[in-house]
Structure formats: structure tokens, C-alpha cells
Amino acid sequence: MIVRRLDDVKTVDWGNGLSRRFLLQADGMGYSMTDTTVRAGTTSRLEYRRHLEACYCIRGTGEVVDSAGTSHRIEPGTFYALDRHDAHFLVAGRDEDLRLVCVFSPALRGDERHSLDPSDFSQY
């Protein structure tokens, strides 16, 4: 059994927020679970070429925008899954950080960080 508390997990500044990584590749579960904060007012161009990601919003508001420009509002209780390695924009609302519980498959190593370049999608 694996039991961890927020204060005990690896925390990574991923570029526009913090990722608290509860489960990693070394844990042998085959997937990762993170508690991710996206800083208020930020827009991140993201694409996971080696991972599928599912996210559940627990605080804040924002939107996820696909590469075709279709926007989906995010608020507490919203779930979205990037089931095709989708390139996307993750936009946090202006007034409050966005907080997501995320699952990655396959599992993250734990040291991954985004390279947020306004001209290309960050990937790992």
C-alpha cells in the first residue's frame, strides 16, 4: 500500500504552476496521479506525445482549447481527457488559480517540466 500526504510528495514547477506528483513511474502502478495548480491568468500550449492525460477540476475556473480552437469551460466538477495526445491550450481564469487532479498513462518519471514557448506546444 502506498500512502502519501501533500507535504511529502515531489513538487515540480512545470512552467505555469506547480505539479505535486503523488504517484510516479518508480511506484510501479503504471500511471501517475498529480495535484496540479495552474497559475491564474496564464495560458499554456501543451501536448503530451508520450502520455495520455485525464484531469478533474477541484478549484478555480478556466478553459481547455483544442488545436482547432474549440473551447471547453473548466470549473469545479469538470473532467476532461486528452485521449489522442491532443495538442491544447490550458487557460486559467484571471482571478484564481486553477487546481486539477490529473492522471497520466504511462507514468511520469517525476522530473518532467514544460518548456513554454509561445510559438510551439510544450511536450514530454
Image (spheres, rainbow, N blue to C red):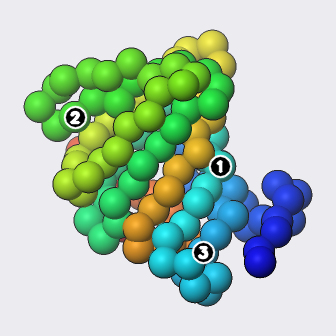
Marks 3 and 1, the one that precedes in the sequence: 3
Q: Would you say 40 lies left or right of 55 here? A: right
Marks 3 and 2, the one that precedes in the sequence: 3
Q: Would you say 120 lies left or right of 112 here? A: left
Residue 22 screen position, x and y as percent: 69, 64
Q: Is residue 2 above or below residue 104?
A: below
Q: Quadrant of the N terminus?
A: bottom right
Q: Tell me the number on the disc at residue 105.
A: none
**Label 3: how many Cα within 10 Å (few below 14, some 14–19, many 20+):** many
Q: Amino acid at mark 2?
A: Asp
Task: Identify the secondary structure beneath mark 3.
Answer: loop
Residue 103 screen position, x and y as percent: 50, 57
Quadrant of the image occupied by residue 6: bottom right
Residue plotted at (11% across, 31% down): 68
Asked if residue 38 can be seen in this view, the reply is no
Q: In the rendered image, which residue does mark 1 sit on? A: 35
Q: Amino acid at mark 1?
A: Asp
Residue 121 screen position, x and y as percent: 27, 50
Q: CA distance from mark 2 to mark 1?
A: 22 Å
Residue plotted at (54% across, 67% down): 32
Q: CA distance from mark 3 to mark 2?
A: 27 Å
Q: In the rendered image, which residue does mark 2 sit on? A: 66
Task: Identify the secondary structure beneath mark 1.
Answer: strand
Residue furthest to the left in view is 68
Residue plotted at (51% across, 63% down): 113
Q: In the rendered image, which residue does mark 3 sit on? A: 24
Q: Are marks 3 and 1 in contact (CB under 8 Å)?
A: no
Q: Are marks 3 and 2 in contact (CB under 8 Å)?
A: no
Task: Identify the secondary structure beneath mark 2.
Answer: strand
**Label 1: how many Cα within 10 Å (few below 14, some 14–19, many 20+):** many
